Image: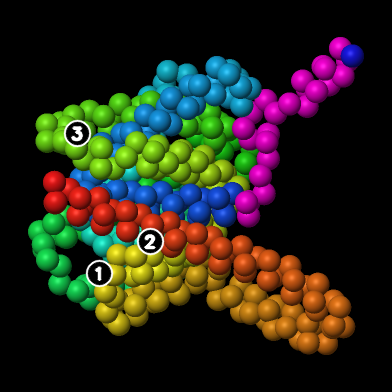
Amino acid sequence: MSGDAEAQSNDRPRSFRQLGSHPAFSISSWIFCSSLTVLLNKWLMSTVGFKYPITLTSWHLLFASLVTQLLSRTTPLLDARRTAKITGRLYLRAVVPAALAHAAALACTNLALARLSLALATVLRAAWPVASLLAAWALGLDNPPLRRALYALAVLPGVALAVVARPAGSDSDSESAGLLFGAGAVVLDALHAAVAAALLLSSGDGAPGAGAGVGLDPLVALYYTAPVSAAATSLAALAVEWRAFDPADLARAGLLTLLASAVASFVLAVAGAFVTTKTSKPTISTASLLRDFLLIAASVIVWRTHLTPPQLLGYALACVAVVHYSLGWEQMAARSAAGWAYAREVAAAEPDEVRRSLAARKSLVVALAATAAGLLTVGYVFSGAGASVAMSARAG
């Protein structure tokens, strides 16, 4: 009996990394949680009127700190922290910069969302491959050839066209500030991703710059960085927003909605860490396109954002440039050829084989459609609830 108990104890996951997850699952979770978090934050700040983006960021990071501390004391998922080689010097040189960059990126993202349409804020994110490549090069984690760097820079003209061709805003000063915050968020997020990769990758991963890696478990990395990020954003919120804080705004937002946004943000942080360790930057850039499409669609349908044809053209050019940077012409041609070959095989296959093959792909399409429909439905519900709250507030 004791032997069975010991065997079960040995089989129990001792770290979050040991729970295991396929890269496709990590990317899917990241896309869903990222979309949900952005939609919740946008609804809170623009529809309900919770006009405290830095405070919202601080709440998310404080929640992540509390959850990781609780998990470390009640579950074995954070036991890997006991073997992590985190010295005081490494903490100051790697953990603290990663935490500060993460906090600043999240705060700037919310500041941009509060001032820009969701579509425009999302278009700015398309420039992430450029910032990521430059950040990795500046930190000595990558040494890209000139051709690859030029492929990344090809994303910028499309983003610039989408920004310049935007409809005239009602508050040009606020929109200009939002664009600056959005650009800053892209740069800071790229810096955070580069430093976090150095923390998460082990010295044996073989990635450029991984020789100084620590190999932290994603949840352990969040355990170390979240308190620093929460402290930094709390100080910023105290200095900038809390003097004008109105408790009525908190009541209108609702504690359950704020809790839901914090949970989504926490899961997003963990999923993002897994994506960083299990996939490459080009893969992340390509996966971001699906998320961006969902968010732009939500902006148009839920918030009635008007997109001009030049904006659509600019974003389409940026998407093509991202795919080209991620895959290259050779892989794009090879995958296109593989797709045509598969289509010919399907056409020549027996009916039963075709039905089985198509059934699997239909399941995937239905799952993606259900995810998109769920996000848009949540947006509709929140939009209607926000309008009711706003009307009640004006009536009162």
Do we see residue 292 in this rendering? no
Residue located 17% across and 48% down the image: 393
User: Is residue 187 or residue 225 the one in the foreground?
Assistant: 225
Residue for badge 1: 163
Local SS, label 2: helix
Residue for badge 3: 247
Q: Amino acid at mark 3?
A: Pro
Q: Amino acid at mark 1?
A: Val
Quadrant assignment, res 9: top right
Q: Is residue 47 left or right of residue 125?
A: left
Q: Earlier in the sequence, mark 3 or mark 2?
A: 3
Residue located 54% across and 71% down the image: 328
Q: Amino acid at mark 2?
A: Tyr
Query: Relative to 203, does residue 375 appear above or below in the rendering?
Result: below
- Residue 387 pos. (x, y %): 26, 57
Residue for badge 2: 380
